[in-house]
Amino acid sequence: MSTSESFIAHLIELRKRLLNSFIAIVLVFFGLVYWTADLYALLAQPLLSRLPQGGQMIATDVTTPFLVPLKVTMMAAFLIALPYILYQIWRFVAPGLYAHEKRLVVPLIVASMLLFLCGMAFAYFLVFPAVFRFIVASAPQGVAVMTDIDKYLSFVLGSFMAFGITFQVPVAVVVLVRMGVVTIEKLREIRRYVIVGAFIVGAIFTPPDVVSQLMLAIPLCLLYEAGIVVGNWAKPTEKTAEAG
């Protein structure tokens, strides 16, 4: 098979995997449409529960009350279909991997998905209540906290992405160690700088109160240490290097 034919074959295979993933998301989405209002209520609960009695959110655009719950449902559909999407990604990349790479990639994909979901859960159950409590308590007297639902959704999605990516630190450390980009000894050596960086990140991406900053900085430090432990176990051996 020529280079051009091989490239076209890869494009066809990629299109197939993307189409399968898209169909899975659409099917799950239509299965969840009936519960659209419930899904949005669940997402909004961390803020609504912190507002004073009778507090509510507002919609400033005509179509927002209809579109925002649908966006939430689409996000839920993507998360439910994520294992199947990752399977499609695996089917696409697996033929080009060595045997020892396949043994590593599957655990990394599963761990990455679980850690991302853990990051979202951490944000929803621990960070959001603390952040919204701070925001409501900081509002000047006579100011009613009435957030637009579209802006609230953007804030929530951004936070989910931030914490989901943050929780990928162990996976990133393992990959870097496995690829030989960095050694375990070097990771231990720069530990103090990582701790300082974690608190800087916590100060940037959370409200200006100590509790919220610690809730991001401490998990970052712990995840970094977890990455070192797992990376030490998964570091390449001479036999693996020769096989690659």
Image (cartoon, helix red, strand yellow):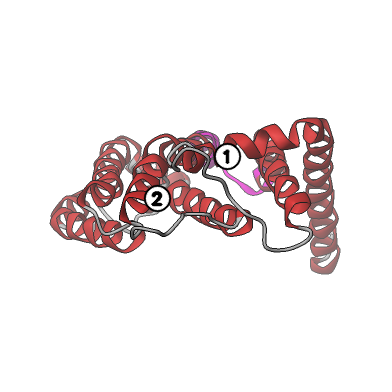
Residue 107 seen in the current view: yes
Task: Work out whether residue 126 or residue 62 is closer to the camera in this orientation and state it.
Answer: 62
| Three-letter code, disc 2 | Thr
- Dot 2 lies on which element? helix
Q: Residues within 10 Å of mark 2 (few under 14, many from 20)?
A: some
* Relative image position of residue 242 (x, y in whole percent): 42, 47
- Dot 1 lies on which element? helix
* Relative image position of residue 153 (x, y in whole percent): 59, 53
Res. 111 mark: none
| Image position of 189 (left or right of 22) | left
| Of pointers 2 and 1, the one earlier in the residue sequence | 1
* Relative image position of residue 86 (x, y in whole percent): 65, 40
**Chief SS of the magenta region:** helix
* Relative image position of residue 44 (x, y in whole percent): 56, 41
What is the quadrant of the N terminus in the image? bottom right
| Image position of 168 (left or right of 219) | right
Point 70% across, 51% down: residue: 68
Residue furthest bottom as drawn: 4
- The span shown in magenta is 94-112
| Three-letter code, disc 1 | Leu
Task: Work out whether residue 74 or residue 131 is closer to the camera in this orientation and state it.
Answer: 131
Q: Nearer the viewer, mark 2 or mark 1?
A: 1
Task: Work out whether residue 132 or residue 171 is closer to the camera in this orientation and state it.
Answer: 132
Q: Residues within 10 Å of mark 1 (few under 14, many from 20)?
A: some
Dividing the picture into quarters, in which one does residue 83 lie? top right
**Label 2 belongs to which residue?**
166
As measured in the structure, the alpha-carbon distance from the residue carrying label 2 to the one carrying label 1 is 21 Å
Point 85% across, 62% down: residue: 8
Q: Is residue 110 magenta?
A: yes
Q: Is residue 115 magenta?
A: no
**Label 1 belongs to which residue?**
43
